[in-house]
Amino acid sequence: MPAEFINFIGFFEQEKLKIPVHVVTFDEPTYEKMTLHSVILAGFQATYCRVLIEKSPANTCHFPILDEAIESYLALQQKDNPLTRFIQANQALEIEALVSELMTNFPQYGYGDIQYEELIQDVKNNAKDN
């Protein structure tokens, strides 16, 4: 979520769009509570550079859920992260079962089956290289 969000909000800011931007977030896993965030188009280009290019934490706090998403995104950029450790610990499972376990145990990352299958393959390939 953070990469896509920062990308398009950074683009809006770059283009100097004068439109109101609102982001709706939901509490997981129930999706019952909805929160509306009004976003000011300022600082997102810097956040884009820091997070997506430099792979560093943002200097600016935009709103809590985005800050949490950035933190998770940056953690997943490391080779040793919660997902790769889970995959390594459960390599005996068939890919379909492992994907299902990942989706059940790590919904906060928002990955889909294809993303998990690619990550599983990357982890297996890295294990062969070492």
Image: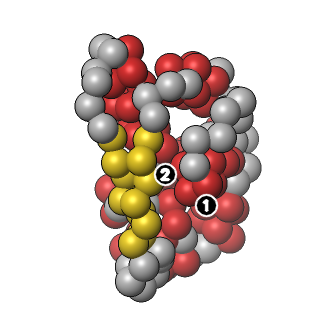
From the image, which quarter does the C terminus lie in?
top right
Point out the tag, 2 or 1, that comes first from the N-terminus.
1
Query: Residue placed at 58% from the left, 41% from the top?
Result: 62
Residue type at mark 1: give it.
Leu
* Image marks 2 and 1: residues in contact by CB distance under 8 Å: yes
Q: Nearer the viewer, residue 89 or 115?
A: 115
- The answer to which image quadrant residue 26 occupies is bottom left
- What is the x, y in percent for residue 50? 63, 24
Query: Residue placed at 50% from the left, 25% from the top?
Result: 42
The reply to whether residue 100 is in sight is no
Colouring chosen for the image of the structure: secondary structure
Q: CA distance from mark 2 to mark 1?
A: 8 Å
Label 2: how many residues lie within 10 Å, few (<14), some (14-19) or many (20+)? some
Q: Secondary structure at mark 2?
A: helix
Q: Secondary structure at mark 1?
A: helix
Q: Is residue 71 above or below residue 44?
A: below
Residue 119 tag number: 2
- What is the x, y in percent for residue 8? 34, 31
Residue 83 tag number: 1
Q: Is residue 127 above or below residue 49?
A: below
- What is the x, y in percent for residue 3? 46, 38
- What is the x, y in percent for residue 32? 38, 83
Residue 7 tag number: none
Q: Is residue 8 above or below residue 11?
A: below
- The answer to which image quadrant residue 39 occupies is top left
Query: Residue placed at 61% from the left, 60% from the top?
Result: 83
Label 1: how many residues lie within 10 Å, few (<14), some (14-19) or many (20+)? many
Furthest residue in direction top, as rendered: 15
